[in-house]
Image (cartoon, rainbow, N blue to C red):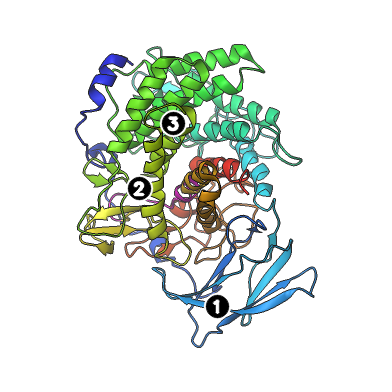
Amino acid sequence: MKRRQFIGTIASLPLVPALLPAQEGPPPTNEPIEKMTAPNWPTINSNHLGFRPRVGSKTLVVRALANPLTKEYELQDVSERGFGFKRPLKQETSDFGPCLTADFTDVERPGLYQIMVGNERSVQFAIQDDVWRRTIPKAVGYYRYQRCGVEVPLVHPACHLDDARRRDNGEHVDTVGGWHDAGDLRKWMDVTMLNGIALLNLYKNNPEPRPGDPTREHVLEEVRFGNRYFLKMQDSDGKIWADVAGGVNGDNSDNHWTDNVIGTPDDRYLNTEKRQGTAAVFTTLEALAGQCYAASDPAYAHQCLGAAIRAWHAFAEPPTLTQDVAWWAMASAELYLATGDAEYKNHAALLGRELMKRQNTEFLGGQKEVRGFWMQGNEPYVEIPDSAVPPLALLKLYDTFPDSEDRTKWLDAVRLHADEYFDPMSRRNAYRIIPLGMFFGSPTPEKHRPLGGNLTYRYFYPARKQFWWQGANCHYAGNALVLGWLARIRGDAGKRYIALAYRQLEWILGANPFAASMMTGEGMRNPFPHSRFVGLIPGGIMNGIAGNANDEPVLDMEYTLDWRTCEYWSPHVAFYIWAHSVLEGLS
């Protein structure tokens, strides 16, 4: 980047629309998934894993579908029948319909439990300190199943050894390797690099793995495998190509096994588009790698850091999208930690100020309910999978630059986001999940829930905006990371954030209207994944519950391989791992 131009122009950037026209895609159509709303049974919606004894809260939700419905619940330790009690349920209004709720946070006794409401029994769950940590080896193991360019025993033979031919001129470029990104075989860059970022943050945040945890050597080896492909995707000008087999221009035919022979008709395409956001994520990852491999492999660390610096300098124009500003802020912090160069510290301050400019601190839209969410131009910021990246970037700056004059402002911005946006919006439903985003009025012909004035919200991505809409488990996991990170910084004053962080993750693991765990291999009533080439992947997290035009939760529990709700995708697993790398250190 020509940094003097970058510094001189970013502060006066014009605001941009929420989405560029090229991103709109095909028009929306009615989809079968929109009719797959929650069934009448089960009504007990609880986290299938369980709870840490003295961390967070312990709750369950009972959908009040039956009339009359019992007004009490019974909790029993299934391994020692002598312990248990009956307590009343609390009636609660909720955006997802009337509910009864139970709070048994005071139960700290380790054990294996079950709850009964009338004749219905919950899934068994544990109260144990490592109940969440036990899922991390599976989540990390997900990446081995997604390896491309090698044989994965018992999963698939060596694949895509002929990747790839440039879509612009047909020339072959060696882009073998990396991870398949989702429930298919494509290799997007921006979202798949989140895998490496999450694993390296797990490496940094857990310097002394406990028995059963992924070892530090395993984490570094897995990241190195994925990073072979990412490094190959940097062009000679320092910019980063977008993807291999991404099916640009509406063409999804690249999503197939090949004959592994270079130059035959089934070779997949390399999309040579170069976006700012992709370069910012790449820079973040490679600067992190430069830090994490410095002790064990200095030459490799130097290679990664050099690639990060080339990407940093490749763009003369300033970023416009809010998520791109946030990722460049994250990249500047990681580059500073890797090099100590004041250039990156200066840009971090600039990018942090730009992010704070994009946060609304006033009550918009004629309402007095919420403030503190981010903006994309003149519209509220609504983005999958980078929902949580703006506050995450400010927290990263706060940790990295303790002597910055803006440090208190960065933390205050995230606290405003948590206290006056996350908290009040999560209280509008019994599950305490944070809606996907805010809107002005009804920008699409479907239900937008009124908040006040002309400000509205939806829990799920608008199904009538464009063809591309889906579940957003990465949104919940990313916000859990924000809340956990904020709790760590705030210490005792931040304990209230921990419970809300875990409520986001509990939605993924069964505390939802379908009582379904959306991580394969954990919990009960797992939907069958859209994973057309590999099948079940232990530790894989699906897109998750989406919403129809009425903003009603929908989830494919009928084995139709619906990609919108049941496809595996990198960001969900990545933010899940990253969130737990922070939450496990809290008490």
Q: Which type of secondary structure does the marked residue at label 2 adopt?
A: loop
For disc 3, the marked residue is 397
Q: CA distance from mark 2 to mark 1?
A: 40 Å
Q: Secondary structure at mark 1?
A: loop
Which quadrant holds residue 177?
A: top right
In which quadrant will I find the N terminus?
top left
Residue 202's place in the image compared with 74, above or below, is above
Q: Which mark is residue 468?
A: 2
Going by the numbered disc 2, the residue's amino acid type is Trp
**Residue 287 at x, y = what percent?**
50, 22
Q: Residue at x 69, y 60 (%)?
A: 127
Q: Which residues are magenta?
A: 464-478
Q: Tell me the residue at 38%/62% (across/down).
A: 34
Q: CA distance from mark 3 to mark 1?
A: 43 Å
Q: Is residue 418 visible?
A: yes
Q: In the rendered image of this protein, does residue 515 appear above or below residue 359?
A: below
- Determine which quarter of the picture holds residue 551: bottom left
Q: Return the residue at label 1.
A: 89
